[in-house]
Image (spheres, helix red, strand yellow):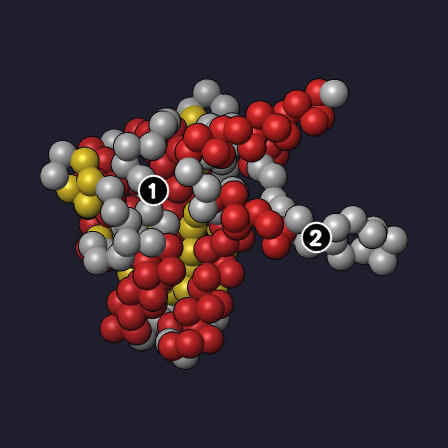
Amino acid sequence: MKTGILCHGRHVLAKNWELHQWGDRKEGLLGQILKTCLLAYQEKAEVIVFGTGASERDGLKESEYTIKYMFEHFDEMSLFNPFDNINLKDLKRHILSFSIPEKKSQNTLEEIKFAGEIFCDYNIEKAIIVSNPDHISRCMQLAHQVYHYTKLKSLENLFAVQSDIGYNGTSSITSKIVEMPHRGDDLSPDLSKYIGNYFKLPLKIKNNFVDLVKNFFEE
């Protein structure tokens, strides 16, 4: 089964970009790039698409900057235990040959759609999305939407793998996922329907809202 991997893009001006994308050597945590490279070795990937978004750094799109950073630091993978028995020279050649920077998308949905189209060019039968613990569930939700509307053959067998580091720079154990009440004995109101509205608020009102919530729990 031919496998394609999408390494989800990350805003290149984000706080702790290197930590989030590369990893934490001291804690032994793998970021998205390292997780993608490890998967490429394990799955014998046919193609690796590096996703992008609206941000740029040093004149490079997210995907281009990510690939540049990866190859500049490739030998440092040896500092992480999962790569102990992997020939990094061979892995580097393999990844160099099959890495594609996707440069058109502006958001996660477009990124998955364009990656799926690239996968089709390679006759991919199994697609794996690599993202962080705080975003991987949304990636899968959007990926299923993309498949529903496009019926891209490459997204028919879709899997997700999360990196070890969340947005706040710590392990996935700190991640919080908001989901609908689903237990028969849980009569809690469904907050999930209101969460989306929070992200549409202006920054000042967002801050006021967070202060309101903090004060509620502190009191």
Closer to the observer: label 2 or label 1? 2
Depth check, front residue: 215 or 130: 215
Taking depth in this image into account, of 77 and 13 the one nearest to the observer is 13
User: Residue type at mark 2?
Assistant: Asp
List x then y, in percent, for residue 214. Answer: 63, 25
x and y, in percent, of residue 15 in the image: 36, 27
**CB-based contact (under 8 Å), mark 2 and mark 1:** no
Query: In the picture, which quadrant includes the C terminus?
Result: top right
Give the residue drawn at x 75%, y 50%. Answer: 189
Give the residue at mark 2: 190
Residue 70 visible within the image: no
Tag 2: Cα neighbours inside 10 Å, few (<14), some, or many (≥20)?
few
Residue at the spot of label 1: 10
- Residue type at tag 1: Arg
What is the distance, in whole Å, between disc 2 and disc 1 at their CAs?
30 Å
- Figure check: 108 above or below 85: below
Where is residue 192 shown, x and y percent of the image? 63, 51
